[in-house]
Amino acid sequence: MKRRNKLFFEKHISPAASEEGIALLMVLWVLTILLVIVMSFSFMARTETYATLAFKGGMEKKFTAEAGIERGIMELYYRNQHKNETVELEGLGVWKTDGTAYKNQFVGGYYIVKITDESGKVDINDTSELVLKNLLLNYGVKAEEADTIVDSVMDWKDADDLIRLHGAESDYYQSLPNPYKAKNSDFDTLEELLLVKGMTPEILYGNSEKRGIIDFLTINAKTNMININAAPKEVLMAIPGMSPDIADGIIAVRQTKEIQSIQDVQEILGSNYTVMSAYISTEGTNTFTIDASGYKENEKGGYTIRATVNLSDISATDLFKYVYYKSPVTSKQ
């Protein structure tokens, strides 16, 4: 039987047919390999295309945000020239410097610009301990943690080595895994706060649910007073004697006109006028923070730039200078 099968295969399957079968298998393998290569190149090309489109879209939003920064600077100079005019032409009103959002739409996208006078923030180099503590407490920081941060901030910038009740000086910082010394002078940047005992990135920068206190702090106001014409509600609420109703009343007044003196809102302040008058003013600075976010049409995500500019004399060669510039920043419009 076995001999008969062997004779059958030798008779019906020639060496040429066997070679053709091997060649067919090789062709199939080559085609498979080529198919894999083609699919890989196709996938890579698609990935590169999407990456290029994403990069292009990101750059477009970035340039749009930069245009918003330039628009904000232009509006600041326009404001300086026209803020005291009693008659306001439609579409030519001066922009407010209290963080009010202004939107400019154009073909393919838009930008949103907010301008805040630095005098409407808490200057960490000059503020009172009570204002800083109130800001932290209102943010949600526990009282003990707030005391630690406030005392440590004061110890960080004072010239001596005396330690406040909840504070820290060089002895504490030298004991850390990466030791350093207390500065014993003013803060040069807000980010420097992260070196201070008790401060955390979440408190300073915020999270997905709320803004960080960095949005309400400054080193450029050069005063311990809060300009109620420019302060956001979070800063107003840090002023001793302030209540939500009083803060809302101040904001309502400045929506229609700029507050010229504290006496203009004395009725709103009521019995708290004496306490609050030691912490508030109506005078601005020549330094402003501009937050500009660029968007593409029909897209929710934007690109935000934050720039702090100091306006110099309009007759000078340099009309302004940047004192801070960050691109991009996380912004909650």
Image: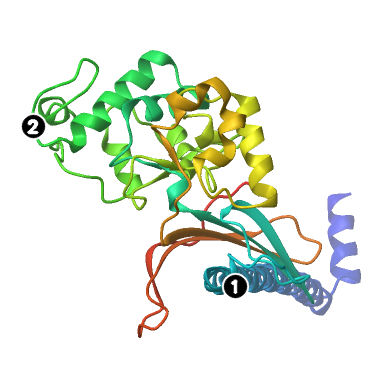
**Residue shown at the point (57%, 24%) measured from the top left:** 270
| SS at circle 1 | helix
Q: Residue 250, how many percent across, how many down?
A: 61, 38
Q: Quadrant of residue 4?
A: bottom right
Answer with left or right where residue 96 lies relative to residue 223: right
Q: Which mark sits nearer the N-terminus, 1 or 2? A: 1
Q: Is residue 114 above or below residue 153?
A: below
Q: Quadrant of residue 284?
A: bottom left
**Residue shown at the point (69%, 60%) measured from the top left:** 102
> Which amino acid lies under the numbered mark 1 shown in the image of this protein?
Arg
Out of 156 and 15, give the one closest to the viewer: 156
Out of 54 and 48, give the one closest to the viewer: 54
> Which amino acid lies under the numbered mark 2 shown in the image of this protein?
Asp
Q: Residue 287, how many percent across, how many down?
A: 41, 60
| Residue beneath disc 2 | 160
Count of number-bearing discs: 2
Out of 280 and 164, give the one closest to the viewer: 280
Tell me the tag on residue 71.
Answer: 1
CA separation, marks 1 and 2? 45 Å
Q: Is residue 151 above or below residue 202?
A: above
